[in-house]
Image: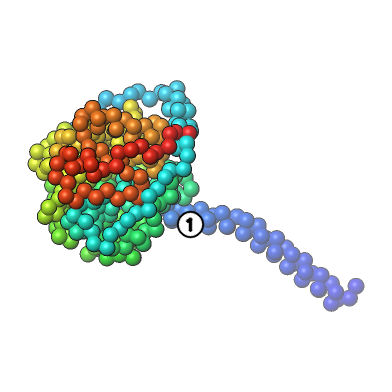
Amino acid sequence: MSRTTRALRTTRAVRAVRAVRAVRAAAVTAPLIGLAGLGLHVRRNMGARSGELRRLAATSPNAVDGVFANTEPGLPRAKASLRMLVNLVRSRAGRNLPGDRVPLAEPRVPTVPGGLAVTWLGHAGALLEVDGRRVLVDPVWSEYATPVPFVGPRRLHPPVAPLTVFSDTDLVLLSHDHYDHLDRPTVLRLARDTSAVFVCPLGVGAHLRSWGIAGHRVVERDWDGVVHVAGLTLTCLETRHFSGRGLRRNTTQWAAWKVAGPDHTVYVGGDTGPSRVHARTGAEHGPFDLTLLPVGAYAELWPDIHADPEQAVAAHGALGGRVMLPIHWGTFNLGFHPWDEPVERARKAAADQDAVLALPRPGQRVDLTGVRTIDDARAAVPTEPWWPGPR
């Protein structure tokens, strides 16, 4: 064998060894890079750093040591046991899913906003038309209500329309920072494609600014704070819930909102448990032409976090509401009950309490302009069941 041949074979052997080492290194490095990328994605979705949230909380009389709290004591909770949790999970399987495709309506967004109309977008999302202005409430277009892709509560139906359909929105109204109400990809697209102002409870704005939304487009208020935007007056109202996007809870404020124009007033409930505050709000800020109140994701394990349907209808009455739109059901699986139980119980409660319930399909617009009496309201709202039973 010549010296040249031996050198060539040595070179080839060295290259082969290097190639094997490179493949091994890639096999180790690629997952690490992927995990690092996932970690960065999750961290960005979480929002503002704790230091910034503590700084904002320190400005609020409703927070102590950087933590917000409800003004009412917690309600007695069912004692959780392993058997109870297993039974809840078993009961959840299948029955909390629709037995057929969820029927959607194509949103009709008029060129000129109405005096009072609402388009339910699914879950807590809605497009309000109040005295010629458009208000997009708690919009979530993502497939999962979670910071981690492909993990957690998944949509039971697609978004009712592309987000571009709502590009003429005047303001985006947020109730709190939970993932099923504050969705980073959605608000970033709205910030990019619209000129809307973002109105939110104290501390939630820090998340938006951390995602690159310009500070002049973000307005924050604490309970009882008032803001005037686009010809509307919005009042931040106390409600009973909690907040948090990471391991720490209650680092930002949660709220309901009064949205008032010259002629119409809407109560946006966000998330709430049963509370005496609804009666106080009704006495101080009511009556309301329309209320948006959550009826789903209730459980004995968290009785003061989410109102059940009967409590929600009672809150509507305490608020002095004329028409109630049940929200927080039908889009994400967040509780253990059958998927249609919230709306069925709400219908019965409304009949028992003589309340007017609007029951539109996701995407269906309900026009309440000109409604002045209960009889007007009953004639104006959809009431027929459209939802498939549980699987």
Please say if 46 is above or below 344: below
Report the residue at 29% width, 32% height from top. 347
In which quadrant of the rendered image does the N terminus lie?
bottom right
Disc 1: which residue: 37
Question: Residue 155 appears in which quarter of the rendering?
Answer: top left
Question: Residue 377 appears in which quarter of the rendering?
Answer: top left
Report the residue at 38% width, 39% height from top. 386
Q: Secondary structure at mark 1?
A: helix
> Residue 387's x, y, as percent?
39, 38
Q: Nearer the viewer, residue 213 or 329?
A: 329
Q: Nearer the viewer, residue 322 or 61?
A: 322
Q: Is residue 242 visible?
A: no
Q: Is residue 14 left or right of residue 193?
A: right
> Residue 96's x, y, as percent?
43, 34
> Residue 315's x, y, as percent?
20, 35
For label 1, count other residues whose C-alpha is less than 10 Å away and answer few (under 14), some (14-19) or many (20+).
few
